[in-house]
Amino acid sequence: MADEWDPRAPEVLADQVSAYDAMRARCPVAHDDYLGWTVFTHQEAVRVVTDHTTFSNVVSSHLSVPNGMDPPEHTPHRRINESYFTPERMAELEPTCRRIAADLVASLPAGPVDVMAALARPYALAMQTAFMGWPERLHEPLRAWTARNHAATLARDPEALESVALEFDGYIREQLDERRAAGDDAPDDVTTRLLRERVHGLPLTDEEIVSVVRNWTVGELGTIAASVGILVHVLAQHRALQDSLRSDPGPLPAAIDEALRIHPPLIANRRRTTCPVELGGREIPAGERVTVLWASANRDEAVMGDPDEVRLDRDPADNLLYGAGIHECPGAPLARMELRVLAEELLARTTAIRPAEPPTPAAYPAGGFTSVVVDVA
C-alpha cells in the first residue's frame, strides 16, 4: 500500500501538533509504512484503546510488563503495578517530592533560563531515583541514556535500540543484585519490594522486574520532563491564568491536565489488530500495526472545540492524557502529584514567569519542547 502521509517528513517533525491537526482535518485514519495505520480522531482513538480484544497491546517480540500484555496475562501484572501508585504511597512520597521541587525552584537563576535544562530534566531524574530508592550517582548516566534512547528510537536503528536497552537493563540489574547481596539489610524501597512480588504463586523473574522498571523509568524521564516544560510554557503564555493559580492553587490539577492536552508530552501508543476490522472508514486486515496518536486525538475539535483554548471546566473523561481502558497509565497518580507539587512550589516562589524566547518543539517520538526559555522573577 502506498504511503498516505510521511510522519518523518521535515515539516512534520518541525511542528508535530500543527501537522497532526492538518491530517485530522483530512481523515480519521491514514496509512504509512513507518507507523502503520495512524488514528487521528478522538472517537476512533477511544474505540481502539478500549477494545483490547480487537486491538492487542502485544506489539513487540520483547517482554513488556504489563503494557505489552493482553488479558488474562495482563491482569495480575497490572494489579502489581497499581499497588505502587496508591493514594497512601503518593502521600508518603509527597514530602520528598516537595523538597526536590523547592530546591530546584530556589536554584533557578534570575533572568532568562531554559527550564528544560535547569528544572524539568533534573526534576524527572531526581524524582524517579527517589521513587525507586536509587543512588544519586545514577543521575548523569540516566540523563545520557535518555538522549541516546530517543535518538535510536527516532532513527529506528535496531542495533542502537538493542544497545541502549541492554545498557538500561544493566542499571536495573545492578540495583537488584545490590539488594539481594544486602539481604535483610536491603532498604525497604520500591526496588526491594519488587523482588518480593509474586504472580500465580511464583516470584517475578528478573526479566519481568527489569521490564516493569524500564517502563516506569522511561516514562518518567521522558514524559515528566516534557510535562514540566509544557506546564511552564503554558503558564508563561497565559499570565492571567498564572496569576489566578498563584493566588488560588486549587484548580491546578485541572489546569495541568489542560496544558498537557494542548501540548501533548506523550505522542502515541501502538496496537496490533487481531482480526480484520473497519476503523474510520478503512478496512484494516488482521496483524496490522495501529498507532493511536494522542497528540491529535486530544486536540480533536469534535470533542474539544478550539483545541488551543485553555478551559478548566472540560469533562475530565474526555482528556486522553493518560490513555483509557485497561491500559490507562498506572503511574498517573504519581505524575499528577509530581506536577502539582512542582507547580505549587514554582508559583509560590515566584512573582512572574514570562516568555523570553519561542520554545523549540521536540521531534517524534518525543513530545513537548527541547528548550523552554523564560524570565523568572
Image (cartoon, grey):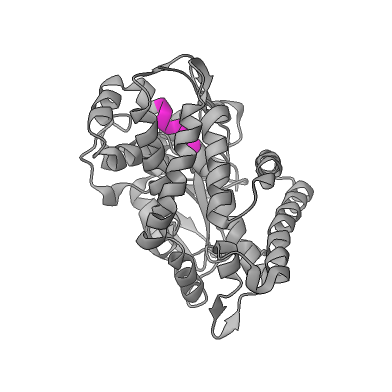
| Image quarter of the C terminus | top left
In this rendering, position of residue 346 left or right of residue 194: left
Whether 333 is drawn above or below 199: the answer is: above
Outermost residue toward the front in this view: 185
The one nearer the camera, 205 or 75, is: 205
In this rendering, position of residue 233 left or right of residue 187: left
In which image quadrant can residue 300 be found?
top left
Whether 370 is drawn above or below 273: the answer is: above
The image position of residue 122, as x and y in percent, is 57, 36
Outermost residue toward the bottom in this view: 201
Residue 223 appears in view: yes
The image position of residue 134, as x and y in percent, is 62, 54
Q: Which residue is painted at 44% across and 35% down in the image?
A: 102
In this rendering, position of residue 102 left or right of residue 185: left
Q: Which residues are magenta?
A: 226-233
The one nearer the camera, 240 or 138, is: 138
The one nearer the camera, 276 or 320, is: 320
The image position of residue 216, as x and y in percent, is 55, 55
The image position of residue 280, as x and y in percent, is 39, 51
Residue 332 part of the magenta segment: no
Q: Which residue is painted at 37% across and 27% down in the image?
A: 349
Q: Which residue is painted at 79% across and 50% down in the image?
A: 159
